Amino acid sequence: MEIWVDSADIGEVKRVHELGIVDGATTNPSLFAKQKSKDFKGVVKQIADIVNGPVSAEVVATDFEGMVRQAEIVSKIHKNVVVKIPCIPDGLKAVKYCSDNGIKTNYTLTFSANQILLAAKAGATYTNVFIGRLDDAGHSGMEVVREAMQILNNYKFETKLIAASTRHPLHIKEAALLGCHVATVPPALIEKLIKHPLTDAGLKQFLADWEKCGCKIE
Ligand code: G3P
């Protein structure tokens, strides 16, 4: 499973990429709103240069012509840019246009298995299940992931599924168990995946015992 960092904060992206297990990144307008920089293209390019993998950057037009115009602009920022297009009717048309014209897309704000089916039929490169937001609304986000993966596998669609809106380690584990192609993960959660209390206790004991043994490595 690919792990992408879900952030538009260049410092955060750089920090977690240095762990060596980050394969790409996703951004969205709300993540940009948290940044001081107003240089959308510059931030996207810097993130793409850091992660050296797919970087999703979102259009903000909501009409077909505007989405396509912005997709053409965004896709030219960097060779690894994947254009995020929201799951609305004009967005579906725009994804189909982009698919037919060699622009990689991430059909986003997707919450149902039927939306995933349409994303795949339109030729989206990636699409998502926003797990945390579904859970927050009283639904089972992971159940939608299971349904989506079954649909993609049933028809051997090439569209890849992103576990998005991830909130805690269980989301990542269960997405991996279900065969999700990607999980996009907030930086703090990526770092949380590494930790376990038994690891910390075990290391503390190892080091205490090593002190007692008087052995040397160097
Ligand atoms: O960026 C896509 C998605 O992961 C954002 O989800 O719920 O954390 O805003 P959320």
Image (spheres, helix red, strand yellow):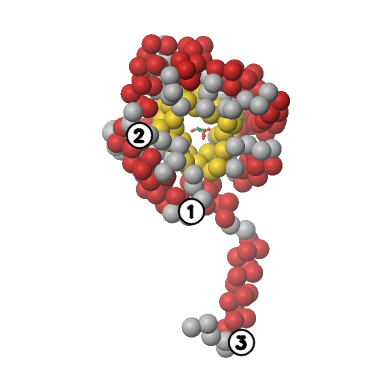
Q: CA distance from mark 1 to mark 2?
A: 21 Å
Question: Which numbered disc flags the more N-terminal residue, 1 or 2?
Answer: 1
Of the pair 50 and 86, the residue shown nearer to us? 50
* Residue type at numbered disc 2: His
For residue 78, the mark is: 2
Where, by quadrant of the figure, is residue 194 drawn?
A: bottom right
* Residue type at numbered disc 1: Gly
The percent position of residue 28, horizontal first and vertical second, equals 43, 30
Question: Which numbered disc flags the more N-terminal residue, 3 or 2?
Answer: 2
Q: Residues within 10 Å of mark 3 (few under 14, many from 20)?
A: few
The residue carrying mark 1 is: 20
Q: CA distance from mark 3 to mark 2?
A: 54 Å
The residue lying at 39 percent from left, 49 percent from top is 14
User: Which quadrant is home to the N terminus?
Assistant: top right
The residue carrying mark 3 is: 213
The percent position of residue 115, horizontal first and vertical second, equals 60, 19
In the visual, does 78 lie left or right of 97?
left
Front label number (3 vs 2) = 2
In the visual, does 3 lie left or right of 74?
right
